Amino acid sequence: MSNQKKSSSETYQIYIASLSDYNAGILHGKWVDVEGLTTDEIQEEINEILRTSPYTKQYGEVAEEWAIHDFELGGIRISEYESLDTIVSIVEALAEHGEAFAIYYNDVSDLETAISNFEEAYQGEYDSFLDYATQTFDELYAHSIPENLRYYIDYSAFARDLDADGYFFEDGHVFRPV
């Protein structure tokens, strides 16, 4: 079992686009590496994108609106108008927990729930759900079953019961209901 962190080559980024430019047919924006940035620092990046708008230079109108047109957040999906506070919280959780957090967040679809319940829900990384079920059964019950009867244990049935109880397995990670 391991708690997988992000790979060293993975970065958490969002592509911020100026909507004034976009609506005028001009592609103007920037990829912003958001890991380690505060909400204010991301806002400064957005302000710089809007300040350097070709639309403003061409039409003399101030570019004020922006949107997130793309993102690389470890598999987590966000909206184009996601709050900066939410993005910072997502990136902090990804930096701490890695891919497993992304899987859990995408399942529960609520950031506050994902952050508060992740450590209790996450059971670790396994080669298969059956491996998890076997290890869990052995840890909980094997000591109370006579050695000569252990060959009769149906680990697959135990795994199905866990699944029916709300446990789930995705990309090698096991989560239990909280």
Image (cartoon, rainbow, N blue to C red):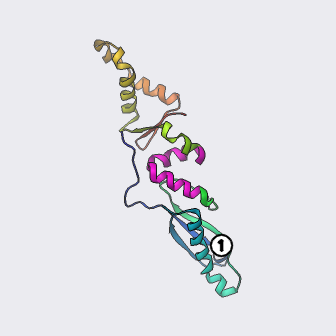
Q: Which residue is mark 1?
A: 19
Farthest right residue in view: 61
Q: Is residue 151 left or right of residue 157?
A: left
Q: Nearer the viewer, residue 27 or 142?
A: 142
Q: Is residue 124 above or below residue 33?
A: above
Q: Nearer the viewer, residue 106 or 12?
A: 12
Q: Is residue 176 left or right of residue 128?
A: right
Q: Is residue 168 above or below residue 45?
A: above
Magenta stretch in the rendered image: 86-112
Q: Is residue 17 above or below residue 102?
A: below
Residue 44 location (% of width, % of height)? 58, 71
Secondary structure under badge 1?
helix
Residue occupying the point 57% across, 69% down: 16
Amino acid type of the residue that numbered disc 1 sits on in the rendered structure: Leu
**Quarter placement of the N terminus:** top left
Is residue 110 visible in the rendered structure shown here?
no
Residue 62 location (% of width, % of height)? 69, 80
Residue occupying the point 47% across, 55% down: 74
Name which quarter of the figure residue 151 lies in.
top left
Name which quarter of the figure residue 131 lies in.
top left
